[in-house]
Amino acid sequence: MIASLLSLAMTTAATLLRQARARAGLSQRALARRAGTAQSVIARIERGQTSPTWETLERLLAAAGVALRPELEAPVVVGSHMLAEVPGILRMTPEQRLQEIKNLSQFLEGARSKEQGAADG
């Protein structure tokens, strides 16, 4: 699963860079020159062979005339049973919330231990 997430991240960076470069009408070499890096760096990122740091991706996209804006957006879930618990969670003190997290963590640790035991035996 981790490998697939890393692959998705690299594909996303590759796609973003390739699309930004194409929109700017730049060759890999021209983008590299603008960004102060080697053309081979651009090529490796676009092929998904390497995953750039956030700063590098931001710099490369800026050189192509594109701004990178990080945004997280939670999906709206309508009719979820989980929404019924929100008022109770909001009424909890910070200490009570931390205790709930601790309880959940212990529960998950126990479940993982049982799962590992079943897989081993």
Image: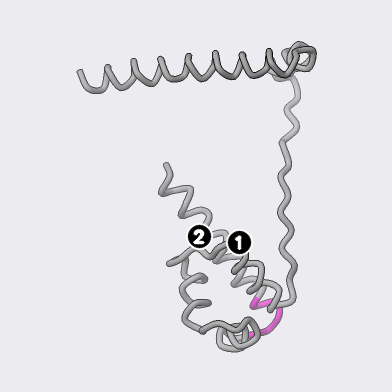
Above or below: residue 8 compared with residue 23: above
In the image, what residue type sits under mark 2? Met
Which residue does the image show at 73% across and 28% down from the upper left? 77
Question: Which secondary structure, mark 1?
Answer: helix
Q: Quadrant of the C terminus?
A: top left
The residue singled out by tag 2 in the image is: 10
Q: Where is residue 9 in the image (x, y as percent from the top left)?
A: 53, 55
Looking at the image, which residue sits at the far front? 95
The magenta stretch is 21-26
Q: Position of residue 5 (x, y in %)?
A: 48, 48
Q: Where is residue 67 in the image (x, y as percent from the top left)?
A: 75, 67
Looking at the image, which residue sits at the far left? 121
Identify the main secondary structure in magenta.
helix
Structural distance between the alpha carbons of marks 2 and 1 = 12 Å
Q: Residue 54: which quarter of the image?
A: bottom right
First in sequence: mark 2 vs mark 1: 2
Which residue does the image show at 73% across and 50% down from the upper left? 71
Question: Which secondary structure, mark 2?
Answer: helix
Q: In which quarter of the image is the N terminus?
A: top left
Within 10 Å of disc 2 (Cα), the crowding (few <14, some 14-19, many 20+) is many
Above or below: residue 39 compared with residue 101: below
Which residue does the image show at 61% across and 14% down from the upper left? 99
Image side of residue 17 versus residue 114, left or right: right
Above or below: residue 78 compared with residue 9: above
| Front: mark 2 or 1 | 1
In the image, what residue type sits under mark 1? Trp
Q: Does the magenta stretch include residue 68?
A: no
The residue singled out by tag 1 in the image is: 54
Disc on res. 97: none
Which residue does the image show at 30% across and 22% down from the upper left? 116
